[in-house]
Image (tube, coloured by chain):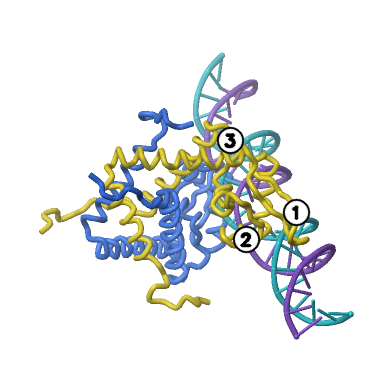
Chain colours: A yellow, B blue, C cyan, D purple
Amino acid sequence: MSMTPRVPPARPLIGVVEDVHRALRDDMARAATAAGFPEVRATHDAVFASLPAEGARISAMAAEAGITKQSMAEIVRDLERDGIVRIDPDPTDGRAKLVSYTERGLRCVHEGQQHIDDVEAQLASVLGKKRLAELRRLLGEVIDALAPGLDNDPAVG
Amino acid sequence: MSMTPRVPPARPLIGVVEDVHRALRDDMARAATAAGFPEVRATHDAVFASLPAEGARISAMAAEAGITKQSMAEIVRDLERDGIVRIDPDPTDGRAKLVSYTERGLRCVHEGQQHIDDVEAQLASVLGKKRLAELRRLLGEVIDALAPGLDNDPAVG
DNA sequence: CGATATAGTTAGGCTGCCTGTCTAATATAG
DNA sequence: CTATATTAGACAGGCAGCCTAACTATATCG
């Protein structure tokens, strides 16, 4: 079918994906700064993604985010210093601490979600809804294609 | 037009892209290990991408890769220790050193390229050539849409 | 009660980047 | 031919973002 005897070596997908990743990350950082949260970095998303509005424990958040308690504790400490979260003793367990959002933190989460929604809307308008959906689908298929454990044993040593 | 009054909140593209990025990176790491280069890490790609077969200087490589000379020097030192590159004094400039591939390094580059080609071929067969091309195009459009300063998005912040 | 599990802390390590400063060598201006 | 950049790279040190190991304090189970 193809009439072209020689395809110029397409840029490896991994490079393109890296660029997109960086672009999206930088865009979020820019938006955070613009929204008045210059201290909020990409790492902190591990907190936002694992801390429900009603609060949670550090261990639970770490497990949810897939990082160690120590790492999560440090990130949470950062965000406490920045006034994004509050850390209180858990009244039901003397060992535990409860992390929850401050007012400012809630505003930050809201702005972040807002920006994500804006970006999605912007992309939908630039690419078209259908093509954005197709992009999502394609990316999902790429992950599936690369997944090292579909035909494989999950108990990989 | 749409009959669905409520769309479930689609996973933010940034999350999906992160996953794909990680999947591709991990896949490369796995391939490197499988090919007998377990020491080669994702960072080292900065070298492979900036070191032509005929060799180059550290500063040139650093500039090409967009990192500092110091960082590049360190990565190059790693790869020298691992027998991937050789470092010789530049005969034409007493200050400079010439970095070049060892035999093993050339094999490593070759295997890496081979794996990238394999993955592209695999994706082409899973997604279809046209859809893979469309994926690449969509990703490019996303970058363009996010590029800060081409036409800026006033909705940020 | 004692053994064990769990929440979090402390201490320290590694990678992957950075800035700042220094040397030696080269290039250039006078 | 010197005097002064400029350049290549090295050395020192720092920061972020993760990790493991070992520890304390509390909780829970038998």
Q: Which residue is mark 1?
A: A89
Callout 3 crowding tier (Cα within 10 Å): few <14, some 14–19, many ≥20: many
Q: Where does residue B48 sit, x and y in percent of width and height? A: 43, 54
Mark seen at residue A37: 3
Is the residue at mark 2 from the same chain as the one at mark 3? yes
Q: Nearer the viewer, residue B123 or D4?
A: B123
| Label 3: chain letter | A
Name the disc covering residue B13, or none.
none
Q: CA distance from mark 2 to mark 3?
A: 25 Å
Distance between the alpha carbons at the discs numbered 1 and 3: 26 Å
Q: Is B82 above or below relative to B92?
A: below
Which residue corresponds to the image point at 71% horizontal and 49% vertical from the top-left? Answer: A87
Position of residue A145 relative to residue A6, above or below, is below
**Measuring 38% from the left and 54% from the top, which residue is drawn there?**
A14
Amino acid marked by disc 2: Ala
Identify which residue, A113 or A90, lies in the foreground: A90
Front in this rendered view, residue C20 or A104: A104
Three-letter code for the amino acid on which mark 1 is drawn:
Pro
Which one is in front in this view, the residue at disc 2 or the one at disc 1? Answer: 1
The image position of residue B124, as x and y in percent, is 26, 61
Quarter-of-image position of residue D20: bottom right
Chain of the residue that carries numbered disc 1 in the rendered image: A
| Percent coordinates x, y for residue B106 in the rendering | 41, 61
Amino acid marked by disc 3:
Phe
Neighbourhood count class around disc 1 (C-alpha, 10 Å): few under 14, some 14–19, many 20 upward = few
Mark nearer the viewer, 2 or 3: 2
Q: Earlier in the sequence, mark 2 or mark 3?
A: 3
Question: Image check: A43 left or right of B5?
Answer: right
Q: Secondary structure at mark 3?
A: loop
Q: Quadrant of the N terminus of chain A?
A: bottom left
